[in-house]
Image (cartoon, grey):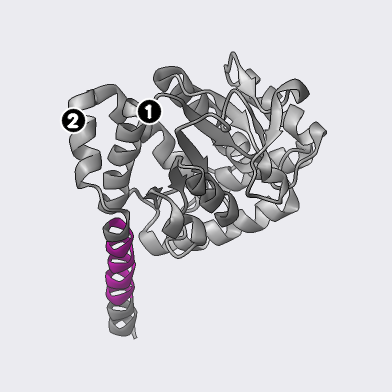
Amino acid sequence: MKIPPDHPRAEALKIRERLVRGFEDGYVVPQGLIAQGRGEVFDYLIGEKTIPPAREAIKAAAAAFKLAEHPVISVNGNTAALCPEDLVELSEVTGAPLEVNLFHRTEDRVEKIAETLREAGADRVLGADPEHLVRLPNLSSHRAVVDDRGIYRADVVLVPLEDGDRTRALKELGKTVVAIDLNPLSRTARDADITIVDNVVRCVRKITREYERMDPDRAKGVLREYDNGRVLARVLDHIRERLRVLADEAAGAT
């Protein structure tokens, strides 16, 4: 679909088209399209931009990666469709491998997502080799299937567009969870150690840039001062204030 560049919703329409192509190619599931619609609602609420509390969380995410021994980037169908090049760049800069991990898991989907990441430049994608697949002990869904070279041994896991069950399971195993979730009220957002309330297409490359600028001493200071509950509260305050301003504007227009 050709989207006019001057369309007021051009960027959002481009995102939708990427997901539709992923659906047509067989690696984005219908449930992923529903999740995208829910995310768009919250993106409207924050103003479709990276807000200050998200920037604070992005710095904390970069710091966590800087100090990690075995960081891993988890990839599902939606993220593979939306920002594969950004994920590959983050992986290359940080040394964190990409691992395919799916709730609606089929081997066909796993391989198609892995191939999408390879086409975007990834040299190595975990999560597809049966010889290295194991199960997390405290999770019953297909997300429990992980790579013993990746999420299973990771100390920091980036989980964009995640479900809450695995976030909690990873934390119970002592891993630091960095979430990207536009919904500040989700279980994932509330259970993660670091929650970036932002659109994944905006924030992944920002994590990369912060990582490149950060040294270990600064990373330690950032994490020492970071409070995820406080950051989520600031997001909700931002939404509340934005709704108040919009309500005042609407009232003034009548």
Determine if residue 27 is in view.
yes
State left or right for residue 227 relative to residue 77: left
- Residue 65 is situated, as x and y percent measured from the top left of the image, at 37, 30
Q: Is residue 81 above or below residue 46?
A: above
> Where the C terminus falls, by quadrant?
bottom left
Q: Residue at x 67, y 51 (%)?
A: 32
State left or right for residue 181 relative to residue 151: left
Q: Residue at x 28, y 68 (%)?
A: 237
Magenta segment boundaries in residue numbering:
231-246
Q: Secondary structure at mark 1?
A: loop
Q: Residue at x 64, y 19 (%)?
A: 118
Q: Nearer the viewer, residue 109 or 189?
A: 189
Residue marked by disc 1: 68
In magenta stretch: residue 8: no
Residue 58 lies in what quarter of the image?
A: top left
Q: Nearer the viewer, residue 85 or 62?
A: 62
Q: Of the residues tagged 1 and 2, which is closer to the observer?
A: 1
Q: How would you classify the magenta stretch by its main secondary structure? A: helix
Label 1 packing within 10 angstroms: few (<14), some (14-19), many (20+): some
| Amino acid beneath label 2 | Arg
N-terminal label among 1 and 2: 1
| Amino acid beneath label 1 | Ala
In magenta stretch: residue 237: yes
Q: Residue at x 62, y 22 (%)?
A: 125
Residue marked by disc 2: 218
